[in-house]
Amino acid sequence: MSGFTWHGGRLAEARAVYGEGEWIDLSTGINPIPWPGVCEVEIDWTALPDPEALMALEQTAAAHFDVDAAHVCAIPGSEIGLRLLGRMLDLPARFLVPSYRTHGEVFARSRPISGGEYLPDEPTALLLANPNNPDGRIFPAERLLHWLDELERREGWLIVDEAYADAVPGSKLAEAVGDDRRLILLRSFGKFFGLPGVRLGFLIAPRAIVAGARQMLGEWPVSAAAVALGTAAYRDRGWIEAMTARLPRQAARLDALLAQYGFAARGNCPLFRLLEVEDGHALFDRLARRAILTRPFADHPRWLRIGLPGDEAAWSRLESALADG
């Protein structure tokens, strides 16, 4: 189980353990309905990424985030951005749990805390995800801004991993970013647009932090493909609005299906749900034997995270697997 509890998307390992077949991957929490324009975007593989095209990508993304483009820096995935911050901010850190395993690796001096613990008096970086993974909890903006005020009084920083924020528009905090605030946000392109292989994310921060990140990333921080696909996708307002409306309906359908077979789901991020059952690893195994990959957890053996099926055939197979208990 160790590999499957490390992170989602381990289909090759699943095939090696459970056999070949048409697998359904519900382990990642990534939108199973990818942006459809991906095959229509022209990409020049013979040239280095163009600086003006990169600037256009950041401006287009900034308009989507509703923030000044001067505060936006394209990065090769939000995880890379987090690791850059660990080097740029020489501070002790606290990271809220449960959350991403990566959050505990970002800062050299860090330890986990729960939401009810007090922050230390010394300058500290507080790292959290909103919406959170794997439980889908969403912190209201008022609470985050209160924590930001407390951290600023200590000359600390609030770092919010908003990798799933596009799926929950009300959870965004970009309007609070400014040169006079110690607030840094990380955004992911691949999760909402269903294209994680593009490896594109964004750092949203005071201009001094953006400048430091650019210096560390160098001249070509992301690929020509990421520039072209990201720009086109963020400009597709019709698809974005339609998908934002569609995902909650799909999540409600998943809730109803799980409840039908006695599983109570929790979470407010529509891309995935968290189950707490008697034996999460046993349920993982039961579904995997039917070529359905989900996400178990080593430190919470009663938990199982499950993403949205992508089509009617996947919905039908999931229902059959749940019914065959």
Image (spheres, rainbow, N blue to C red):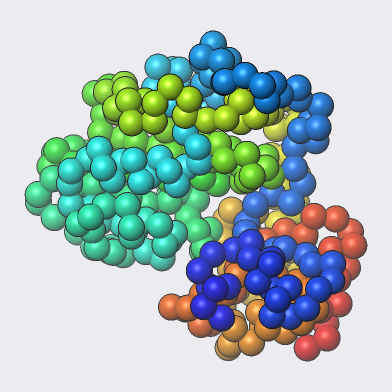
Q: Can residue 103 be seen?
A: yes
Q: Residue at x 47, y 33 (%)?
A: 75
User: Where's the C terminus, which quadrant?
Assistant: bottom right
**Residue 123 percent across, percent down from the top left:** 13, 45
Q: Nearer the viewer, residue 106 or 322?
A: 106
x and y, in percent, of residue 314 in the image: 84, 63
Q: Nearer the viewer, residue 206 or 200?
A: 200
Quarter of the view holding residue 101 = bottom left
Q: Is residue 67 above or below residue 191?
A: above
Which of the pair 108/180 is nearer the observer?
Answer: 108
The image quadrant that residue 254 belongs to is bottom right
Looking at this view, is 7 or 183 the one in front? 7
Horizontal and vertical percent for residue 149? 22, 39
Residue located 65% across and 52% down the image: 30
Locate the N terminus and report the quarter of the image it occupies.
Answer: bottom right
Q: Is residue 238 left or right of residue 91?
A: right
Above or below, 144 relative to 68? below
Q: Which residue is located at x 70 percent, y 76 percent?
A: 16
172 relative position to 290: left or right = left
Residue depicted at 60% across the width and 70% down the height: 295
Residue 209 lies, with reference to residue 128, above or below; the image says above
The number of callouts visible is 0
Q: Residue furthest left?
A: 122
Residue 205 in view here:
no
Furthest-front residue in this view: 46
Q: Residue 110's quadrant in the figure?
A: bottom left
- Residue 100 x, y percent position in the rendering: 44, 59
